[in-house]
Amino acid sequence: MNGFPILSLMLAVPLVAAIACLFADAKGARWIALAATLVDFVLGIILWSHYQVGGAQWQFTESVPLFAGFKWALGIDGIALVLILLSVFLMPMCIGASWLAVQKRVPEYMALFLLIETLIIGVFTAQDIFLFYIFFEAGLIPMYLVIGIWGGADRIYASYKFFLYTLLGSVLMLVAMMWMVNLAGTSDVPTLMEYHFPVAAQKWLWLAFFASFAVKMPMWPVHTWLPDAHVQAPTAGSIILAGVLLKMGGYGFIRFSLPMFPEASAYFAPLVWGLSMVAVVYTSLVALVQSDMKKLIAYSSVAHMGVVTIGLFAFNRQGLEGSMMVMLAHGLVSGALFFCVGVIYDRLHTREINRYGGLSINMPKYALFFMFFTMASVGLPGTANFVGEFLSLGGIYQASSWVALIATTGIILGAAYMLYLYRRVAFGEQKNADAAAMPDLDGREWTMLALLAAATLWMGVYPESFIAPMRADIAHLDARLAQAKPKGDAQVTPGNPASVAPTEEEHAQGSAE
Amino acid sequence: MHPILIIVFAPLVASIIAGLGNKSLGKVPAKVITTGGLFLSCLLSWPIFLSFLHGTAEPSVTPVLEWVRSGDMQFNWELRVDTLTAVMLVVITSVSSLVHLYSWGYMDEEPDQPRFFAYLSLFTFAMLMLVTANNLVQMFFGWEGVGLASYLLIGFWFRKPSAGAAAIKAFVVNRVGDLGFMLGIFGVFLVFNTVSIPEILAHAHDYAGSTIGFLGFRAGTLTVLCLLLFIGAMGKSAQLGLHTWLPDAMEGPTPVSALIHAATMVTAGVFMVCRLSPLFVESETAMNFVTFIGAATCFFAATIGTTQWDIKRVIAYSTCSQLGYMFFAAGVGAFGPAMFHLFTHAFFKALLFLGAGSVIHAMHHEQDMRYYGGLRKHIPLTFWAMMFGTLAITGVGLEEIGGFAGFYSKDAIIEAAYAKGTGLGHFAAWMGIIAALLTSFYSWRLVFLTFFGKPRWNQSEHIQHAVHDSHGHGHDDHTHGHDHHGHHHAHDDDGTAGYHPHESPLVMMIPLAVLSFGAIFAGAIFTHFFVGIEGAPEFWRGALVFNKELAEAAEHLPTGIKLAPFFVMVIGLVTAWVCYLKVPSIPAAFVRTFKPLHTFIYNKWFFDELYDFLFVRTAFALGKIFWKGDKAIIDGLGPDGAARVVAAGSAGAKKIQSGFLTSYALWMLVGLVAAVTWVLKH
């Protein structure tokens, strides 16, 4: 892949297709969008297979100076790679989910989704901090339009809320970026990641970035835009929102906040832990009392993202890798769960949990998949979420047992709200004739859910495929964070001094056994 | 290829085929594949067990696949086989294959059979992964996997609201235990920098006497780790405090209760403690806690067992109580007897459950013992099976003569606890003896109410339905079994309502016969290997800590203590006989006299009500409050509030708007300068 601008190509394909969509009719637009997203998916696979694990930190780099030091600079490391893979895998799903569900203004709809894909990949590939900013913020606009035009009844309120929240944080981030570039004399992200900012300044910069990423994440208490946005968004909008857009916050932390401001990150870690603990417990309890399926899953997303931020600020490899795995896993599983909601929403046009019931009787295939993703969301070992949650929580335990305890209660609460949801939807007798008459999954739906399930299992049983590319990058980051690392609360004292000497002998005994 | 690969993965493959094939596959192929897979596993497991019995096998670890590697946190899919695993392998695969076979008959009228058999096989796979784990995370995988299968099987009849509720309860309560287990694994990793079981055990002794900070306290390192892990064991094995899910789990089909909620899954906690016995023995506090919880559970559950009317619930509480025995055995350091009781209990408790299933099958899904009676003559084979199970669980036997399976293992436990010599050891032994009295009482109560006396079937709605249906008013949608007996008129005077119970089919009788054999002989055959002073160290070979001194001390106990279990067993039997056959008015009189006590015990010590109030209602109430908080406070101060402020502010702003571009530019400049100055200053 020497010199071939594959990243630019991945950005260009959906963009060109988006323009083409605008000149096509509904049917044509659908096929163009599907083809373009599949091409990008194939390009993503090529990217993955050509990525050299253990090679250079930044690969597939491109750099074209534009003006005033501003560069078209792209490149990825392992962290970006896996998030790009997630994005290109979910995009065809989004198109598939909207295949029949969206009937009005199809060309514009498809064009916007393709634009979102370009911008998402741009976020993960940008190597110039301002280029990143542009992609990061521009991603808001098509999403805003998707919610505002194709959304539900209360879409205008939801789209404004979404826009205002996310924009507010961004303004502060821009100011911080300008200040940083001014000081470091470069807008090159890899250089900035190695730059040592004065500790006092780090704190302000960290807060400015935090304002933006915390909203995107979303962290408690700036999460309230998410349930509204999800509820009003069309199914595909929810999939991409939960699957990828939320990951931009986590990506921001791991790409900017942590490596650029290690001391500030350590200083503010207790703040992040506090907010994350609240998020896990508070939003899980809120999820328990929801009567709207999408809202329930949206609140559960906030709780899962709490585990991500906890892992990120655990300051060790388990925490960091765990967070990345939770992000990937949550992308797949919450995407799949929103699609599951979409499947029955398309049939009955309501998200009220109480309108359903006993779906295992008339929709057994659907019930199977829904069960699978419910269990995945609950973090059952063998699914993707478990690997991530286990590592994240194991990571934070090394920093603080209190945080670990509170955050791990999420596995109890998560089981409670998800199984309670499942019971009301799929168990029991059929209460409503129209729900009882719904047909089971068709081929399109089955294929999509099967693919998502296969990916979830793969990531749960053999996550090495996904951890391997980012291992070196995480190790690098971990080394950079090492000096700022907060002290753990465990502080194990050396035990039984008498037995320290004959350790070798005991070890031999142990292995003989 | 090591046979363990086939043993473990045959049930998984069978489960996937039957589960995904489901209705398109058809009932019989699904049953053949899953049952065949299990018998294959079982056939391959016994040779492994026998080779460990003869001391010819070596412990082995078979790698399967890399799993996770994150810094020093590394764990792989691998299958460990040693003596402890071998014991569990035969228990799991034998009971599971018999339960598969039994279900051919028991679930015969069920339209959804492939799903049922797929779940059963899936459970077996998860359980096998649990016992073959070489690291704590794979054990946790199996742990959660059996939890999933248990959830699915309890909720198998998902149309029943009570089944759905029981399934959730089982999963969520288990998750409370899993929270402890997970934190325990994290703690182990923090301390030992590995999650590999052999490595942890090898270094356990190094940390004896060290301390660790946990939740702001400082405590013994191994005490903290063991207690956290033990919380997991308490959840899975339904010990006091986390036991509430087990009785409700009886909502599942009876074969499930036999396999999961008696013989295998619920013993996972005991297995875990035995597997980690070198770790547990290093912390006296943890061991004492295990002893106390075990002893308390064994007594507490037995008291409830004496008052219940539902035949399955009696056996469920009995299971809970027997698990208590195993735990206090482990707690006093008698891991051999704990595993021995696990082994024998698997046979006789599975037998009791399957026997109860046969009774329920014969009685048209009636489970209330008040409506049984006199069944001995109608279903004699089931009666004898239940008799053997009862003789085994009540521990009938004398040292000089020999006895049924439970006699060997239960007496070994009580003796070991007493021989421990500490106050807590004596407490546990006495709790065990009292529980043995109660066990004898409730077990014989069950037998007398069910098989002896006069039929009381005419009061049962299930039976009335059955009789009614057979008179030609049958409904097609009646899924719960139908009987092809003749059209007699109801003989209300003899209490049968004209109903004729039938013995269950052969596929149900064969498992009962095999398990009866186990319930009678498993104790006598294997006692030498599991707990014998000469045999046990040879047999276990370090797979668990075998305390030889304790075993020797148990040999030399006063005769009074050695005979106590026997005497209380006889007392329980006689009491039950007097109360339920000789003078049937006694129980009612007793209930009248000790009303508050009976109410307390009959309502299971009000644990469910307490938890419902403390946790379930609180969680929902908090959820509602927080949700309102989202709307009122966060949004109110945030976007909605901001919108109001903007609306109000813009009215004022209108006045400032001069319309001159330069004045706007000036304001912007002022603002920017202020912002930048502020940033630079800090």
Image (cartoon, grey):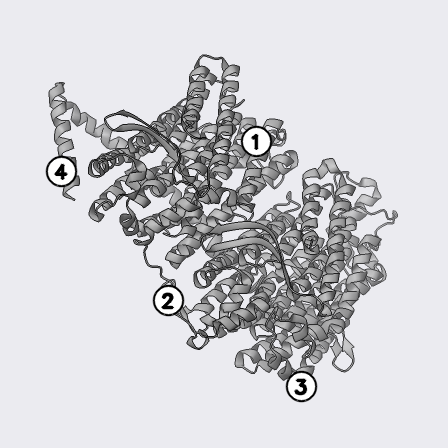
For residue A473, side relative to residue B132 (left or right): left
Tell me which chain the residue with mark 4 is part of: B
Where B299 falls versus A29 (above or below)? below
Q: Secondary structure at mark 2?
A: strand
**Horizontal and vertical percent position of residue B200:** 51, 65
> Label 2, on which residue?
B217
Question: Could you give the CA–CA distance between mark 1 and mark 3, rounded to whole angstroms?
Answer: 70 Å
Q: CA distance from mark 1 to mark 4?
A: 54 Å
Whether discs 2 and 1 lie on one chain: the answer is: no
* First in residue order: circle 3 vs circle 4: 3
Q: Which residue is mark 1?
A: A448
Q: CA gap, disc 2 to disc 1?
A: 50 Å
- The answer to whether residue A154 is visible is no
The amino acid type of the residue labelled 1 equals Met
- The disc label shown at residue A106, or none: none
Disc 4 or disc 2, which is closer to the eye?
Answer: 4
Name the residue tied to disc 4.
B677
- Which label number is shown at residue B560? 3
Can residue B226 be seen by looking at this rendering?
yes
Crowding at mark 4 (Cα within 10 Å: few <14, some 14-19, many 20+): few
